[in-house]
Image (cartoon, rainbow, N blue to C red):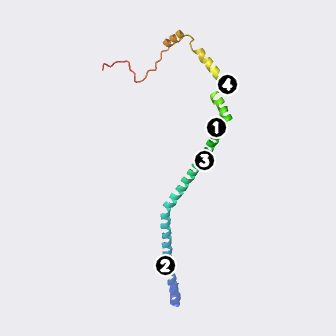
Amino acid sequence: MSTLVDQADPEAAESESAQATTHSRTSGRTLALVGALVAVAAMLVLPVRSWISQQAGLAELSNEIAAAEDRVAGLEAQREQWKDEPYVEQQARLRLNMVRPGEMGLIALDPEFQRDVATSAEDEPRTWYDRLWQSSENPIRDEPAGDSTTNDGG
């Protein structure tokens, strides 16, 4: 059909060929533009990846700094507590079982602990000769690995 148009209207054929060359030039320009954009994107991948990893590292470090600042604030509050004389006295009484002069200190033992002590006291022999006799009945067999009583003649 284009041959009929070419014969009938030479200007139409000319405009059609101009559009084809313009279209091919546009395709070449578009291809060059896309290629340039791909090249720029490829060059930016590594710096952007580094930037993202650095931002993640900064976020982690800022979290650590915030935790350290919280710990410092807690320690400063604790230091202020230790400057208070009644608090120091209370801690001395609780932790060190200290009493004021003239006071009598009492220590309450845990009932579980008392039962454990009572059963272990019943298991032990009461006299020195009972302990001696028991030690001869149950000799200790734990010898260090390096000790050898055999003599190899060397």
* Of pointers 4 and 2, the one earlier in the residue sequence: 2
The Cα atoms of the two marked residues, 2 and 1, are separated by 84 Å
Q: Residue at x 66, y 29 (%)?
A: 93
The three-letter amino acid code for the residue at tag 2 is Arg
The Cα atoms of the two marked residues, 1 and 4, are separated by 22 Å
The three-letter amino acid code for the residue at tag 4 is Pro
Which circle marks residue 142 in the picture?
none
Disc 4 designates what residue?
Answer: 101
Disc 2 designates what residue?
Answer: 25
- Image quadrant in which you'd find residue 79: top right
Viewer can see residue 4: no
Q: Residue at x 55, y 56 (%)?
A: 55
Compare residues 101 and 66 and report the one nearer the observer: 101
Asked if disc 4 and disc 2 are in contact, CB closer than 8 Å, the reply is no
Left or right: 61 as drawn, with respect to 147: right
Compare residues 89 and 126 and report the one nearer the observer: 89
Q: Residue at x 50, y 58 (%)?
A: 50
Q: Residues within 10 Å of mark 2 (few under 14, many from 20)?
A: few
Q: Residues within 10 Å of mark 3 (few under 14, many from 20)?
A: few
Asked if disc 3 and disc 4 are in contact, CB closer than 8 Å, the reply is no
Residue 75: percent from left, percent from top = 61, 42
Under tag 2, what secondary structure? helix
In this rendering, the label closer to the viewer, 3 or 1: 1
Asked if disc 2 and disc 1 are in contact, CB closer than 8 Å, the reply is no
* Of pointers 3 and 1, the one earlier in the residue sequence: 3
Under tag 4, what secondary structure? loop
In this rendering, the label closer to the viewer, 3 or 4: 4
Which circle marks residue 82 in the picture?
1
In this rendering, the label closer to the viewer, 4 or 2: 4
Quadrant of the drawing holding the C terminus: top left
Disc 3 designates what residue?
Answer: 69
